[in-house]
Each structure stands twice: as C-alpha cells, then as structure tokens.
C-alpha cells in the first residue's frame, strides 16, 4: 500500500485520485441514478465510479469525463477491461458456463435454464440512442 492506495496488478501504485463531492455527484447524475452498464437503480451511497477507459491505459484518464456510475457488480466484473473486451466476455457467458460449470450444464439438460445468447447493449448506449 502507498498512501492508502493499493498497487495494481503490475505492481504500480494506482493513479486514482479522490473525487470531490461535486465531481462524485456529477458522475452519479449522468444517468439519473442508474448503473451506466446494467441500468439498475443505484442509491448514491452504493454507486461505484468506473473509469470507462481503464486508467492504467493512458495519461489523463482519471478525469470526470472518463467516469461512469456503476453498481458494485458491474464495476467488479468489468475490472480493468475495455468496454468491448467486457462486452465480449458477457456475450460469451453461455459458452463459458457450458464449459466450466457442471451445475449449469445439468440445469440446461433438465430444462430449468435456457441459454439465451445475445448481443450486449449497455444501459448508457440505449439511453444515448433515445
């Protein structure tokens, strides 16, 4: 740890800075209290701030215009992936579960789960196209 910030996977200290209350509120308000990815309602206190473009990928990415409101689940699962990388991971979920999860295979075999592969469109993409 360095000044309360954990090192990233490459051992370098995170470049993340603490947001001001005004910046944090502006990120929350971008999608009216919804996760930018799944669209779930978010309480302000539950919001996590996600860097749309991973901060480890370039200079000057730790700015509010590169931040989106995210629920804990989406922020955790996206991690440091690019949006398209994460989209591919999500779209591959049925195949990944089929390959790696015996319980899933059983559920499919007995008809309690039906795989529904589909193209992923994130909440912020649906909202911006309206």
Image (cartoon, rainbow, N blue to C red):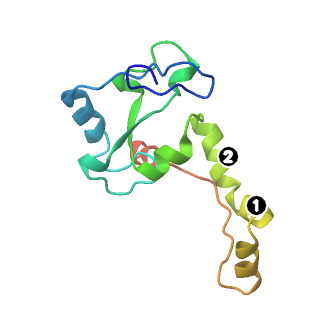
Task: Determine which quarter of the picture holds residue 17.
Answer: top left
Query: How many numbered marks appear?
Result: 2
Res 33 seen here: no
The secondary element bearing badge 1 is classed as helix
Mark earlier in primary sequence (2, 1): 2
Closer to the camera, 9 or 120?
9
Res 94 seen here: yes
The secondary element bearing badge 2 is classed as helix
Instruction: Point out residue 99 in the picture as x, y percentages from the top left corner.
Output: 80, 62
Label 2, label 1: how far apart the Cα atoms are: 11 Å
Other residues around mark 1 within 10 Å, as few (<14) / some (14–19) / many (≥20): few
The residue under label 1 is 95
Name the residue at the bottom extreme. Answer: 110
Task: Determine which quarter of the picture holds residue 28.
Answer: top left
Above/below status of 1 relative to 91: above
Name the residue at the right extreme. Answer: 99
> Going 31% across and 53% down the picture, which residue do you hit?
42
> Going 71% across and 75% down the picture, which residue do you hit?
103
Other residues around mark 2 within 10 Å, as few (<14) / some (14–19) / many (≥20): few
Name the residue at the front extreme. Answer: 1
Q: Specify whether 69 is left or right of 56.
A: left
Instruction: Point out residue 18 in the picture as x, y percentages from the top left corner.
Output: 31, 25
**CB within 8 Å, label 2 to label 1:** no
The residue under label 2 is 88
> Going 42% across and 49% down the picture, which residue do you hit?
72
Instruction: Point out residue 6 in the picture as x, y percentages from the top left corner.
Output: 48, 28
Instruction: Point out residue 27 in the picture as x, y percentages from the top left corner.
Output: 30, 35
Q: Specify whether 119 is left or right of 22.
A: right
Q: Specify whether 5 is left or right of 113.
A: left
> Going 38% across and 49% down the picture, which residue do you hit?
35
Name the residue at the top extreme. Answer: 59
Above/below status of 103 relative to 84: below
């Amino acid at each position: 740890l360095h000044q309360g910030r954990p090192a990233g996977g490459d051992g370098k200290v995170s470049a993340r800075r603490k947001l001001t209350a005004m910046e944090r509120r502006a990120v929350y308000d971008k999608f009216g209290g919804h996760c930018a990815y799944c669209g779930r309602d978010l309480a302000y206190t539950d919001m996590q701030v996600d860097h749309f473009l991973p901060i480890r990928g370039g200079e000057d990415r730790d700015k509010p215009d590169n931040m989106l409101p995210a629920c804990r689940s989406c922020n955790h699962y996206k991690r440091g992936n690019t949006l398209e990388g994460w989209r591919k991971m999500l779209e591959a979920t049925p195949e990944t579960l089929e390959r790696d999860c015996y319980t899933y295979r059983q559920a499919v075999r007995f008809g309690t789960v039906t795989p529904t592969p589909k193209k992923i469109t994130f909440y912020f993409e649906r909202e911006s196209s309206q």
